[in-house]
Image (spheres, rainbow, N blue to C red):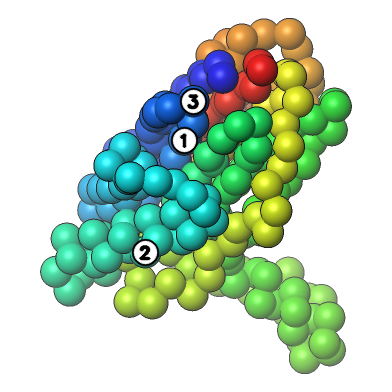
Amino acid sequence: MLIGNAQYIGTRQEQEDSFSTAEDKKVTLAVLADGMGGYSNGKLASSLAVDTFIQGFLNAESIYPVDQFLLNNANICNRAVLDKAKGKRMGSTIIAALISQGNLYWASIGDSAIVLFKNGEFINLNKKHIFEAVLEDQYVSGKITEDQLLSNPLKKRVTSYIGAEVLKEIDMNENPIKLRYGDKVLLCSDGVYNSMTEIEMEKILSKKNEPFNIAEEIIDTIRKKNLDKQDNATVVVLEYRS
């Protein structure tokens, strides 16, 4: 497994994204968290979530069944952030990708993204836990109009996050995804996917570059755009080589 990563603070005063990777007994884990800027201590929330998840992996006697391990670890992270908050509103998104014996497992809470680049195809794996998803369901059922869907100022509000009294949603794959040589797994915060198109990312991922160079090129592309109100941007790239 080859691993690359890169970050950009954007126009924000503080980098509130955190990430880490760990390998143990031929198992690789990558975790990325985006602290919620509207709450207290977004950086603390994201770093605590990532550290707790990684320690849970390193200290585990067994990670099997993997789906149960990911679910338990997510709940432990949630409790850790809640305890640290001491009654204040403190939260973070979190995504995790675990690769064992050539199988990809993942878990997601919030609006960060997990992408699989396989056979030249860009595949979004997780859904975003944002209010827009609720509005879309209401639109499909005829409860609101398209204009109400598009104009709602709260549509990007995160609806499930680490640090909530109750985790409303945890998105996970039902079945492991079998990886092949050269497949790439991309974890990124919304500061990446809101600043680049899928076509732009596909072009970079298609190149025969090492994951570190791919991650750097993604962040360099965002930096060069010099967008107003650029959010923190973080990307982790995993490439399967077995």
Between the C-alphas of marks 2 and 3, the distance is: 25 Å
- Image location (x, y in percent) of residue 92: 38, 55
Q: Quote the CA–CA distance across marks 1 and 2.
A: 17 Å
Q: Local crowd at mark 3 within 10 Å, few (<14), some, or many (≥20)?
A: few
Quadrant where the N terminus lies?
A: top right
Q: Give the residue drawn at x 61%, y 10%.
A: 210
Image coordinates of residue 130 in percent, x first then y, are 58, 66
Q: Which residue is mark 3?
A: 26
Q: Is residue 32 left or right of residue 41?
A: right
Residue 49 or residue 226, whichever sits in front = 49
Answer with the quarter of the image where residue 82 lies.
Answer: bottom left
In this picture, residue 164 sits left or right of residue 196: left
Residue wearing tag 1:
29
Name the residue: 65% across, 37% down.
Answer: 103
Indicate the position of residue 137 as horizontal and vertical percent values: 75, 79
| Callout 3 secondary element | loop
Residue drawn at (76%, 25%), measured in percent from left and top? 180
What is the distance, in whole Å, between disc 3 and disc 1 at their CAs? Answer: 10 Å
For label 1, the SS is: strand
Sort mark 1 into few (<14), some (14-19) or many (20+) by Cα contacts within 10 Å: many
Looking at the image, tell me whether mark 1 or mark 2 is earlier in sequence order. Answer: 1
Name the residue beneath numbered marker 2.
Answer: 75
